Image: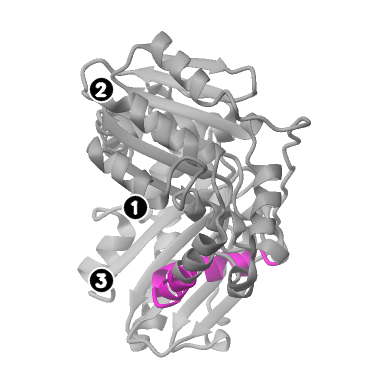
């Protein structure tokens, strides 16, 4: 059973007690990501996430790591287009220590100039690492192409020129405006006593305050079909085909999850079986959906030799068409539902997974769907709804193509659904 409380300073706390485990997973979720930044400061949110680990008013970088290691806990953070999460997992007996460390990191980052300069080089190396990872580079390239001119086109890691020059003043100013208690969710799952844990959280975050009310920005990214290529001297060509998808939190997400599982989400999917198993064209072939607050992007990814690109892309487009000519059976629909439900139920046995699902849902949607209700929504999907979503998703005039490797943009323009 979920419990939700709102603290006096505006922080929302969501908790789920799991008495049969010995762990506690705890996360601070702040609704700020790369799409909040604007091009002039692109990358500052990700940089701030790094700086949370680089010392506070009470702890040095080493002390943060040493204190967490001393309790055998796990500490990490990540930034996305729309939010940042700093989280920890520890034994239930060490929850108070983990809470004290994370609350200190989130509320009192020091932004020390020497640490900024050291971490600047780390982030520049991270950007270079992404540029050496064609799969990651392709994902950014596709989003930059279809959302060109909008906030979603900005990469999470940011602009190298900005990262190279940003100073302490920019951090303090941006942090004060965007990292606020009223756009923050604290999520807790595991073995704890709810009233006692809530009081500990209240005390830990008592000093977190900002002047004025938080005004949530209204985003409206516009998908425009496009073609993009990054020519790179590598062994394979990495190709992505994209379509506009659904925003986060809509009921269409359930038939879309089933559709993706059937089409390209696993080893038994049509894409994997046709492209890899039957024709041996690619080692890596899959599809996935990315949903945001106001829109979504459905992507199909493949990595393969240059001389296989044309054949593979034509086969991928053929699989989209075959989805409608060789329709999914009731038996396949039922099997896929069971696969999705089983994966979901098994994930509930992990306190970290439950904390993450709660925190993200409360932050982005303002609500948490009970597991039973979610399972019922999956069961309710029939083939009629499945194909209604499929027809909207695979609109031929909305298809986009992007590639990284030894292929030009002109070579991609001939592909049409």
Residue 210 magenta:
no
Q: Which residues are magenta?
A: 123-148
- 3D distance between C-alphas at marks 2 and 1: 39 Å
Q: Which mark is residue 192?
A: none
**Mark 2 in CB contact with mark 3 (< 8 angstroms):** no
> Measuring 52% from the left and 74% from the top, which residue is drawn there?
402
- Dot 2 or dot 3: first in sequence order is 2
- Dot 3 or dot 1: first in sequence order is 1
Q: Quadrant of residue 130?
A: bottom left
In front: label 2 or label 3? 2
Q: SS class of the residue under badge 2?
A: helix
Q: Left or right of 378: which side holds 230? A: right
Residue 196 x %, y %: 40, 11
Q: Residues within 10 Å of mark 3 (few under 14, many from 20)?
A: few
Residue 272 x %, y %: 28, 62
Q: SS class of the residue under badge 3?
A: loop
**Mark 3 in CB contact with mark 1 (< 8 angstroms):** no
Q: Which mark is residue 93?
A: 2
> Measuring 52% from the left and 39% from the top, which residue is drawn there?
106
The residue tagged 1 is 265
Q: Give 48 or 383, whichever is nearer the viewer.
A: 48
- 3D distance between C-alphas at marks 3 and 1: 14 Å
Q: SS class of the residue under badge 1?
A: loop
> Measuring 25% from the left and 15% from the top, which residue is drawn there?
19
Of helix, strand and loop, which mostly describes the magenta segment?
helix
Q: Left or right of 4: which side holds 180? A: right
The residue tagged 3 is 283
Q: Which image quadrant: the N terminus?
A: top left
């Amino acid at each position: 059973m979920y419990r939700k409380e709102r603290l006096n300073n505006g922080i929302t706390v969501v908790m789920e007690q799991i008495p049969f485990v010995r762990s506690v997973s705890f996360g601070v979720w702040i609704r700020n990501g790369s799409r909040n930044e604007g091009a002039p400061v692109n990358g500052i949110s990700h940089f701030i996430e790094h700086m949370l680990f680089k010392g506070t008013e009470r702890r040095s970088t080493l002390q943060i790591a040493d204190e967490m290691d001393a309790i055998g806990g796990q500490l990490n953070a990540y930034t996305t287009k729309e939010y940042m999460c700093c989280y920890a997992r520890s034994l239930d007996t060490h929850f108070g220590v983990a809470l004290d460390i994370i609350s200190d990191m989130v509320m009192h980052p020091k932004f020390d100039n020497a640490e900024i300069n050291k971490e600047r080089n780390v982030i520049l190396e991270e950007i270079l690492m992404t540029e050496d990872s064609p799969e990651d580079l392709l994902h950014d390239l596709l989003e930059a192409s279809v959302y060109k001119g909008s906030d979603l086109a900005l990469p999470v890691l940011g602009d190298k020129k900005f990262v190279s020059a940003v100073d302490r003043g920019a951090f303090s100013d941006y942090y004060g405006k965007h990292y606020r208690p009223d756009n923050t969710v604290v999520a807790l799952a595991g073995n704890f006593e709810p009233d006692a844990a809530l009081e500990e959280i209240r005390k830990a975050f008592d000093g977190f305050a900002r002047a004025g009310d938080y005004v949530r920005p209204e985003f409206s990214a516009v998908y425009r079909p496009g073609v993009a290529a990054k020519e790179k001297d590598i062994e394979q060509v990495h190709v992505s085909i994209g379509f506009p998808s659904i925003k986060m939190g809509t009921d269409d997400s359930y038939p879309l999850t089933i559709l993706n599982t059937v089409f390209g989400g696993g080893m038994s999917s049509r894409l994997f079986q046709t492209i890899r198993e039957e024709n041996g064209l690619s080692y890596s072939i899959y599809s996935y959906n990315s949903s945001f607050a106001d829109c979504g992007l459905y992507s199909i990814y493949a990595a393969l030799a240059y001389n296989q690109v044309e054949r593979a892309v034509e086969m991928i487009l053929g699989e989209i068409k075959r989805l409608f000519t060789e329709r999914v059976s009731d038996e396949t629909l039922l099997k896929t539902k069971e696969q999705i439900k089983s994966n979901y139920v098994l994930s509930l046995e992990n306190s970290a997974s439950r904390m993450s699902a709660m925190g993200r849902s409360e932050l982005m949607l303002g609500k948490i769907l009970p597991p039973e209700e979610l399972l019922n929504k999956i069961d309710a999907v029939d083939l009629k709804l499945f194909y209604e979503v499929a027809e909207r998703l695979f609109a031929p005039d909305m298809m986009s193509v992007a590639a990284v490797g030894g292929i030009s943009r002109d070579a991609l323009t001939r592909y049409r659904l």
